[in-house]
């Protein structure tokens, strides 16, 4: 790769033209990864449970995913400068596929810790560079649309993965081989879009940690989303049971949240392309998140009304990720954008670590309603911190 101070190849004559070849390659690739993750995460938990591991040990092994993401994020930009964006993505794909097969080949429990580390390190690299690729080939005024499509495809992958798991089960090599095969298939679109590959400047040496604070409205938004999403997925079934719903009823409420995320990301992305300052949109999403969280105790006895509210709430809250990423792309480019994407995923991973613990402690102290109180606290903290900053720095 030759040194360049540009994020991509020379732009087309039309500055509003989307490089659909590059965008489709990155979206299709990460969509396949989302499908593999949706299949693999429940698969690994079920296999460990069948082997007699306790819930705490399974949780400890699963937590390695967050640790791997935190370790991977600072190193993505240096790897991409050394091996190229596409080369680094292909290396990550191979490593993720091999580790997926390794879960079947290696039986001792301790071996699953390094396997998890390699697998989620590789997946984090794929997420960061795919999002960088998408932002690089999308014109500013249409970036929200493209990222909305990306978020929708990713959400569909996560939704279809568990369905695929329900079909293939957890026994034998098939589910592991299928997951590895899906990951390897994510390399195909990358080979077809080589000419659209974004390029990083070899000479860029800014610290990764600097980008945690360059666009705080975006990085703090994804931290809140990571906390709410991971905490909600982990503890909503417990919350649903504690307020009187059946296991199936609680699961269907969680499905309503996921369907809202799938349905609303493209409309929210289009909306973000039409606002002058995406920070105001992020603040509005956080306000909706706060109000929705506070409504949970009031709607606990009405399943249907709660499902409708959670559908809308889940879709709008997921906009913190989609529009936060679009806002990041509108402020930075080139190597700066790649490093900022890494900081973005770092903050998301940090949210994944603090969310379940925060919600769990709140429920221990306040009972079932502690679930809603903790969610509300995350959104309120964002509104206070970023709202005040936005008022002080209006442009």
Image: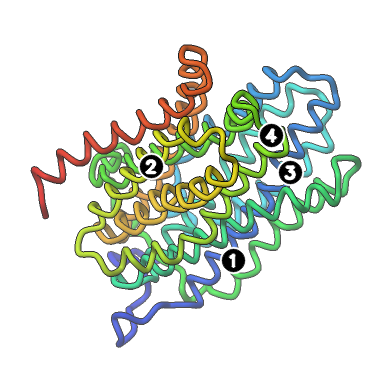
Q: Which residue is mark 2?
A: 289
Q: Which residue is mark 4?
A: 115
157 sits left or right of 21 in the view: right
Among numbered discs 2 and 1, the one appearing first in the sequence: 1
Front: mark 4 or 2: 2
* Percent x, y of residue 170: 85, 40
Crowding at label 4, few (<14), some or many (≥20) Cα neighbours within 10 Å?
Answer: many
Single out the mark in the foreground, 3 or 2.
Answer: 2
Q: Are marks 2 and 1 in contact (CB under 8 Å)?
A: no
Q: Earlier in the sequence, mark 3 or mark 2?
A: 3
Q: Nearer the viewer, mark 2 or mark 1?
A: 2
Near mark 1 (Cα within 10 A), the count class, few <14, some 14-19 or many ≥20, is: many
Q: Which residue appears farthest toward the right when viewing the image?
A: 172
Which residue is identified by label 1? Answer: 28
Horizontal arrangement in the rendering, residue 4 relative to residue 373 (left or right): left
Q: Nearer the viewer, residue 71 or 275?
A: 275
Mark-to-mark CA distance, 4 and 2: 36 Å
Residue pointed to by mark 3: 100
**Residue that appears at 53% across and 42% down:** 306
Sequence-earlier tag: 3 or 4: 3
The disc at residue 220 is: none
* Residue appearing at x 39%, y 62% in the figure: 268
Front of the two marks 1 and 4: 1
Say what secondary structure mark 1 lies in. Answer: helix
């Amino acid at each position: 790769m030759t040194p360049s101070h540009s994020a991509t190849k020379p732009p087309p004559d039309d500055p509003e033209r989307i490089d659909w070849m590059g965008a489709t390659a990155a979206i299709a690739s990460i969509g396949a990864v989302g499908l593999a993750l949706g299949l693999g995460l429940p698969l690994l938990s079920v296999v460990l449970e069948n082997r007699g591991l306790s819930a705490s040990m399974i949780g400890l092994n699963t937590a390695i995913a967050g640790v791997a993401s935190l370790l991977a994020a600072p190193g993505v930009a240096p790897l991409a400068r050394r091996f190229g964006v596409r080369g680094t993505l292909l290396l990550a794909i191979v490593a993720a596929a091999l580790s997926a097969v390794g879960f079947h080949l290696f039986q001792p429990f301790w071996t699953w810790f390094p396997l998890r580390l390699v697998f989620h390190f590789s997946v984090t690299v794929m997420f960061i560079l795919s999002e960088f690729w998408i932002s690089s080939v999308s014109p500013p005024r249409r970036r929200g649309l493209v990222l909305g499509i990306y978020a929708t495809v990713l959400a569909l992958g996560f939704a279809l993965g568990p369905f695929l798991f329900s079909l293939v089960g957890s026994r034998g090599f098939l589910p592991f081989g299928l997951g590895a095969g899906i990951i390897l298939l994510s390399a195909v679109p990358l080979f077809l879009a080589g000419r659209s590959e974004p390029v990083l400047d070899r000479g860029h040496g800014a610290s990764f940690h600097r980008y945690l604070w360059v666009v705080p409205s975006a990085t703090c938004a994804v931290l809140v989303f990571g906390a709410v999403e991971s905490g909600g997925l982990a503890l909503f079934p417990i919350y649903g049971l504690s307020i009187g719903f059946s296991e199936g009823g609680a699961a269907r409420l969680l499905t309503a949240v996921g369907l809202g995320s799938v349905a609303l990301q493209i409309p929210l992305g289009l909306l973000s392309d039409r606002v002058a300052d995406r920070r105001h949109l992020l603040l509005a999403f956080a306000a909706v998140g706060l109000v929705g969280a506070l409504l949970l105790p009031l709607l606990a006895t009405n399943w249907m009304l709660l499902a409708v509210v959670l559908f809308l709430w889940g879709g709008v809250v997921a906009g913190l990720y989609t529009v936060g990423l679009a806002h990041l792309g509108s402020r930075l480019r080139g190597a700066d954008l790649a490093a900022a994407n890494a900081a973005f995923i770092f903050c998301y991973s940090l949210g994944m670590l603090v969310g379940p613990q925060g919600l769990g402690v709140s429920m221990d102290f306040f009972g079932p309603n502690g679930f809603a109180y903790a969610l509300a606290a995350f959104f309120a903290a964002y509104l206070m911190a970023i709202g005040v900053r936005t008022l002080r720095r209006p442009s």
